[in-house]
Image: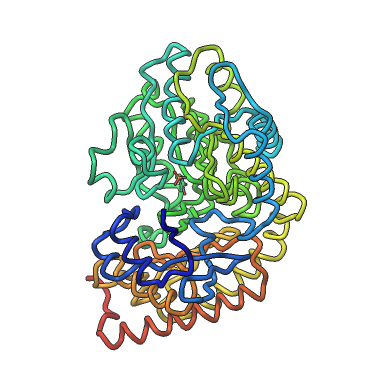
């Protein structure tokens, strides 16, 4: 077998990639023409590519590398676990120490009453578990008809058929026969894009009350659960108005609806607490976790389940699970990640150092003529781009055109900022130091200036009518 290594010429790696590797959420033909950027290594908050560029990762991979890259302890734990027990399943009345230890630790860190963990290999899988778990819960309670799940437009809950159906992405639903039956989507609390002349408070309340209207329309005895991200991530880092979550909580309580908080991004420190539910003041019955659970060093996800639901599910055989549920290497690595987060006070530092520095930098950046505002909670943020700040106007060009241009300028300046439509997204590793936040701001400003100049030159600073 011939080895493919980091030392091969970039063009050769790109050609092999294009020939055999199908990328997710990508037009692969376009990518083949352009050539994928080859990432070769990473340390702290910096990536290195095959051309030797040092790129500041403002996205923590895909919102997941909370403790930063290159932590040797994580590799050592993985190696040790592989030598001792590389794999065993948790079906058939068996268990192992990594799964026991991780479940206990998660229960300890989770809010009161959330004491049980069902493991999965990813966030998508965990949300598939949740669909089946909430439906099974109500069926076991003698209400099999209480099976509909309400979610939100522009939510992201994963990419499998079940989790993609929970999500509210139209472009995903357009392919492959989604959503599955029994899933309903209400409007999102995106004041910047959809609030019009309403105050954020009034708008947040109105959007929350769409949940109540939907429950009444479907019938309380038909609705199993409401699922939402405490702060929408992939939808564009949408921080709901203050009025939103208290009203959602009131409605879930009033109608006996299970609340599922999808904590895949918000969990494990991103918003300045262990969980986004704590930051937003909500009491979910189930929390979806993945990403920051292992800081992306191993694929692992799960559902943290409250006592009440766990009690009902545990009384029957739940015909569900994954080969890699509680995978020992992934669990051991996640456990080490939780140790690092705690012993190095990383979440406390997010609150006292990281998030304030990020906010201060981004507030300055938001004064840029191209930036229409700032949405931020802890270490997740977005900057909506606009041709006209005062009216929060959209560009005349197709949604995403300008965001894509800006992302390309970021890349050219050795910065990873993702775009969602025409919003620029920021979600750095939680361990980012203030001096690297300064580097971020310098590169981001250059990218914004270059995008602005390009838009001017191409006469694209026009608002949609
Ligand atoms: C990424 C994400 C998921 C899906 O997780 P995967 O590990 O990619 O399957 C689910 N929910 C949210 C909120 C996410 O951000």
Check the image and tell me how it is coloured: rainbow
Q: Position of residue 121 (x, y in %)?
A: 49, 38
Q: Is residue 111 visible?
A: no
Quadrant into which the C terminus falls: bottom left
Q: Going 57% across and 24% down the picture, which residue do you hit?
A: 90
Q: Please say if 233 is above or below 277.
A: below
Is the residue 426 above or below the residue 445 in the image? above
- Residue 257 picture location, percent across and down: 47, 28
Residue positioned 27% across, 44% down in the render: 173
Residue 23 place in picture, x, y as percent: 34, 55
14 on left or right of 199: left
Position of 196 with respect to 43 (left or right) is left
Res. 102 in view: yes
Work out whether residue 303 or residue 26 is closer to the camera in this orientation and state it: 26
Residue nearer the viewer, 140 or 339: 339
The reply, left or right, for residue 10 in relation to residue 95 is left
In the foreground, 77 or 284:
77
Figure quadrant of residue 114 = top right
Q: Name the one closer to the observer, 160 or 222.
A: 160
């Amino acid at each position: 077998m011939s080895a493919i290594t980091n030392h091969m010429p970039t063009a050769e790696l790109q050609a092999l990639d294009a020939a055999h590797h199908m990328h997710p959420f990508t037009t692969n033909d376009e990518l083949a023409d352009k050539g994928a950027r080859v990432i070769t290594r990473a340390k702290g908050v910096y990536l290195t590519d095959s051309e030797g560029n040092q790129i500041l990762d403002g996205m923590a991979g895909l919102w997941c590398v909370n403790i930063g890259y290159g932590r040797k302890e994580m590799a050592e734990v993985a190696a040790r676990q592989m030598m001792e027990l590389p794999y065993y399943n948790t079906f058939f009345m068996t268990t192992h120490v990594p799964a026991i230890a991780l479940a206990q630790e998660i229960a300890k860190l989770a809010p009161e009453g959330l004491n049980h963990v069902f493991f999965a290999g990813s966030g998508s899988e965990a949300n598939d578990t949740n669909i089946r778990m909430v439906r099974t819960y109500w069926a076991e309670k003698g209400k099999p008809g209480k099976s509909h799940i309400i979610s939100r437009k522009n939510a992201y809950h994963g990419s499998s058929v079940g989790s993609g159906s929970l999500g509210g992405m139209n472009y995903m639903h357009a392919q492959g026969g989604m959503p599955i039956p029994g899933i309903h989507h209400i409007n999102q609390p995106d004041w910047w894009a959809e609030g019009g002349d309403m105050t954020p408070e009034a708008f947040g309340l109105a959007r929350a009350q769409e949940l109540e209207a939907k429950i009444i329309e479907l019938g309380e005895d038909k609705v199993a659960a409401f699922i939402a991200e405490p702060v929408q991530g992939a939808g564009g880092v949408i921080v709901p108005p203050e009025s939103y979550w208290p009203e959602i909580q009131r409605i879930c309580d009033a109608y006996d609806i299970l609340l599922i908080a999808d904590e895949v991004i918000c969990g494990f420190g991103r918003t300045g607490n262990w969980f986004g539910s704590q930051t937003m003041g909500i009491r979910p019955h189930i929390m979806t976790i993945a990403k920051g659970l292992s800081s992306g060093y191993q694929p692992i996800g799960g559902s943290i389940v409250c006592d009440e639901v766990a009690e009902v599910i545990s009384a029957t055989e739940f015909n569900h699970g994954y080969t890699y549920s509680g995978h020992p290497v992934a669990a051991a690595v996640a456990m080490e990640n939780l140790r690092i987060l705690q012993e190095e006070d990383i979440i406390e530092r997010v609150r006292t150092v990281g998030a304030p520095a990020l906010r201060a930098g981004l507030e300055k950046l938001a004064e840029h003529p191209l930036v229409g505002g700032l949405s931020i909670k802890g270490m997740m943020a977005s900057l909506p781009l606009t041709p006209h700040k005062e009216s929060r106007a959209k560009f005349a060009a197709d949604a995403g055109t300008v965001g894509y241009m800006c992302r390309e300028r970021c890349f050219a300046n050795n910065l990873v900022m993702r775009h969602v439509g025409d919003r620029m997204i920021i979600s750095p590793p939680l361990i980012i130091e203030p001096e690297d936040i300064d580097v971020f701001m310098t590169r981001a400003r250059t990218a914004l200036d270059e995008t602005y100049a390009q838009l001017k030159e191409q006469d694209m600073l026009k608002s949609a009518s």
